[in-house]
Amino acid sequence: MKKAVSILVLIIAMTSCNSEKKQNPIEGTWRLISAETTEKDSTFSTFNPKTKMIKIINDTHFAFFNHDLKHGKDTTAALFFGGGGKYTLKDSIYTEHLEFFNNREWEDNKFEFVVKVQNDTLIQKGIEKVEKLGVDHIIIEKYVREK
C-alpha cells in the first residue's frame, strides 16, 4: 500500500510539472522605442521622442497608453491616448481586436501583425487599415521590455 501511494504521489508530481502553462513570449509590459509607417512608396518615422508609449499584453488582452513627457503641463503639447482589447496569437501571427480607443472610429477593427521577440525586444509589423478613415499603411513598431 505504501508503495502504491508513493507511485501515485510521483505520478501526480510529474503530471503537475508537465501541465505548467508555456510562457507566452509577448506577455509583459513593453515601451515603444521606434515606429515607422509606409504609405504607398513613402516610409517615414512616426516615433515621437516627446511622448512615452507602453503596451501591456497579458494572456488574453492588450492595452496601450501614450502620453506626453511634460505630463500635460504645456497645453499646446498635452497628449494622451489609449486603447485595447482582446488578441490572438498563432505562431508569429498576432491579431489585435481593438475594442476600446479614444478615437472611436478605430474601434471594432482587427489588425494583423507578424511579431518577433529577440531578447528584450518585441518587433511588430503589419497593416493598419480602416476604410472609413482612409487609413491603409504598413507599420513596424519596436518595443523594449520594461523591467
Image (cartoon, grey):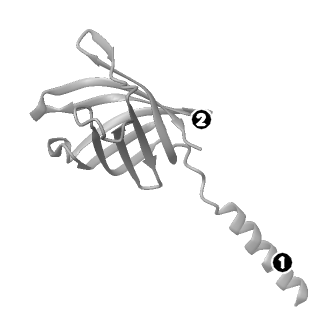
Quadrant in the picture for residue 36: top left
Task: Look at the image and tell me in which quarter the N terminus lies.
Answer: bottom right
Name the kind of residue labelled 2 in the image.
Asp
Q: Residues within 10 Å of mark 1 (few under 14, many from 20)?
A: few
Quadrant in the picture for residue 118: top right
74 vs 62, nearest the viewer: 74
Badge 1 is on which residue? 7
Badge 2 is on which residue? 120
86 vs 67, nearest the viewer: 67
Q: Secondary structure at mark 1?
A: helix
Count of numbered badges drawn on the protein: 2
Whichever of callouts 2 and 1 sits on the residue coming sooner in the sequence is: 1
Name the kind of residue labelled 1 in the image.
Ile
Q: Measuring 34% from the left and 25% from the top, which residue is drawn there?
A: 139
In the current view of this chain or complex, which residue is farthest to the left? 132
Instruction: Tell me, for residue 124, which label it has, or none.
Output: none
Task: Look at the image and tell me in which quarter the C terminus lies.
Answer: top right
Relative placement, left or right, of 23 versus 16 is left
